[in-house]
Image (spheres, rainbow, N blue to C red):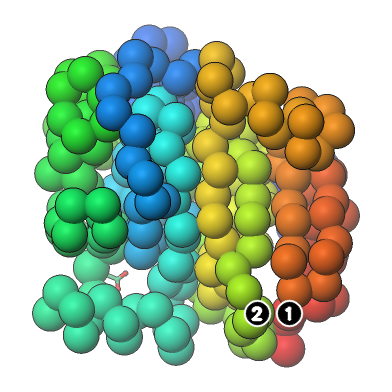
Amino acid sequence: MNRTLDVATSFAGTLVSLGGGLGIGSLSVGPLGARPEKPLELYEFEACPFCRKVREALTALDLDAVIYPCPKDGPRYREEIRRRGGKAQFPYLVDPNTGKEMYESDAIVRYLAEQYGTGRVPFGLSLGPITNLVSTSTSLWRLSHGRLYRAARAPEKPLELYSFELSPYCRIVREALCELEIPYLLHNVGKGSPRRDAFVARAGKMQVPWLHDPNTDRSLYESADIVAYLNATYAA
Ligand SMILES: N[C@@H](CCC(=O)N[C@@H](CS)C(=O)NCC(=O)O)C(=O)O
């Protein structure tokens, strides 16, 4: 897909997700509760509409998570979930702070709201089949992006990505990380995030996506440059 079409369809996905108030996404961080000591762990793939609901909740609740991408035919983390939970179904959340592990997006979103929010599920994520339909419509714009495995070598250490769910540019980077099955620590910095100042202090300006690769000590802005870097460094 050429770059203009790539960005246009990602923007379209964002507009669908926003959905004039009935959308599943919000640009802003909502009311927050207790903060986890350790980052959550999420097994998911970018194109999965149910996984998107969980990532939206992570942005709204200003939570970090180590993402273990599980694209179709991915050799690494899908198998791990089959062993841990009994089936390859995504999303699958692990909370190392409480020992909780679970399937089912609605249960995960509810758990996150209770544990790390005020107990209330964000409105757009509480509408059952409507929420699922909106999230599926967002995926449709991106065709197979963020769904299928592309052969790649695994990094020694997880990468780090600053992002928020609705950003069309961040989506393009998350899709590439997912296809290459590269694990990464996802720092969510939605609008209103109290952690934006710390991000600016680290990276230099408030712009996402921003990727840091501790394996090569490279840090990059600009989705096109990040995707080119990932392909050149990790794709087989
Ligand atoms: N009710 C589940 C549905 C999850 C689900 O159907 N996930 C699909 C991906 S969108 C899946 O894991 N399919 C198996 C696969 O990808 O191999 C939820 O809300 O979490």
Q: Which residue is mark 1?
A: 234
Q: Which residue is mark 2?
A: 155
Disc marking residue 34 = none
Residue 9 appears anywhere in the view? no
Q: Quadrant of residue 42?
A: bottom left
The amino acid type, in three-letter code, at marker 2 is: Pro
Q: Nearer the viewer, residue 204 or 93?
A: 204
User: Compared to 192, does 142 lie above or below?
Assistant: below
Q: Position of residue 39 (x, y in %)?
A: 41, 51
* Residue density around tag 1, few if under 14, some if 14–19, many if 20 or more, within 10 Å: some
User: Is 66 displayed left or right of 215 in the figure?
Assistant: left
> Callout 1: helix, strand or loop?
helix
User: Compared to 54, does 224 lie above or below?
Assistant: below
Q: CA distance from mark 1 to mark 2?
A: 8 Å
Q: Position of residue 172 (x, y in %)?
A: 66, 50
Which circle's residue, 1 or 2, is located before the other in the chain? 2
> Would you say the residues marked 1 and 2 are in contact, meaning their CB atoms lie under 8 Å apart?
yes
Ligand 1: image quarter: bottom left
- At x 73% / y 89%, what residue is drawn? 236
User: Compared to 149, does 36 lie above or below?
Assistant: above
